[in-house]
Amino acid sequence: MALDDFDRALIAATQGGLPLVPRPYDAVGERLGVSGQQVRERLAQMLETGLIRRIGAVPNHYRLGFTANGMSVWDVDDALVDLLGERIGQLPGVSHCYRRPRHLPNWPYNLFAMLHGRTRAEVEQQAVQVAELLGPACRSHDILYSTAILKKTGLRLKHPSKED
């Protein structure tokens, strides 16, 4: 699906979040020179077509006290990794879950799940739950803990200037 100029402007205006005002769509529309209703309608179309996945609140887990974050990596039977990955992704402490290629012989892991907790002990308990869910399909795993936030945003599209 090709983006037109309005779509690009709308994405650029909303990709960092909606304004924290009583009528956010109206505020975005005012910035773009359209009505709030037009903003709502186009965002609804973008959701329907899958151009955007969702509109929702994104809590800052660090400010909520979830500071022990670990990317858990799992060596899972390739025949079961998709099915089991879907189940892992539904666990409450998991914010991201991906299938990734192995890089043998040094990197046997093909399933990645980001776990969040207030302490490393909480994250490790979540890893125990993941291991139990994976059962014998899991051969090994590890947890890579975050040590610093270097960047924390979603994908950002560049809004081209008129000269681009």
Image: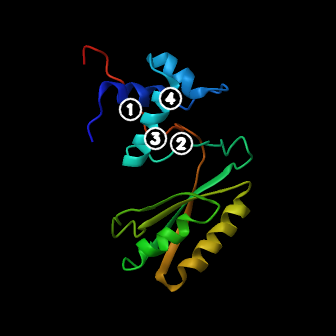
Tag nearer the camera, 1 or 3: 3
The residue to which callout 2 is attached is 55
Q: What is the secondary structure assignment of the residue under circle 1?
A: loop
User: Which of the pair 10/152 is nearer the observer?
Assistant: 10
The residue to which callout 1 is attached is 157
Crowding at mark 1 (Cα within 10 Å: few <14, some 14-19, many 20+): few
The residue depicted at 45 percent of the width and 48 percent of the height is 53
Q: What is the secondary structure assignment of the residue under circle 3?
A: helix
Give the x, y percent position of residue 135.
54, 83
Crowding at mark 2 (Cα within 10 Å: few <14, some 14-19, many 20+): few
The residue depicted at 30 percent of the width and 33 percent of the height is 3
Q: Amino acid at mark 3?
A: Ala
Res 158 seen here: no
Crowding at mark 3 (Cα within 10 Å: few <14, some 14-19, many 20+): some
Tag nearer the camera, 2 or 1: 2
Q: Earlier in the sequence, mark 3 or mark 4?
A: 4
Q: Amino acid at mark 2?
A: Ile
Mark 2–mark 4 distance (CA, rounded to whole Å): 16 Å
The residue to which callout 4 is attached is 37
Q: Earlier in the sequence, mark 2 or mark 4?
A: 4
Could you tell me if the residues under marks 3 and 2 are in contact, i.e. CB atoms within 8 Å?
Answer: no
Q: Amino acid at mark 1?
A: Leu
Q: What is the secondary structure assignment of the residue under circle 2?
A: loop
Mark 1–mark 3 distance (CA, rounded to whole Å): 19 Å
Could you tell me if the residues under marks 3 and 4 are in contact, i.e. CB atoms within 8 Å?
Answer: no
User: Which of the pair 62/121 is nearer the observer?
Assistant: 62
Task: Indicate left or right for 84 with 63 as reference.
Answer: left
Which labelled disc corresponds to residue 44?
3
Q: Amino acid at mark 4?
A: Gln
Q: Which picture quadrant has residue 60?
A: top right
Task: Indicate left or right for 38 with 103 as reference.
Answer: right
Tag nearer the camera, 3 or 2: 3
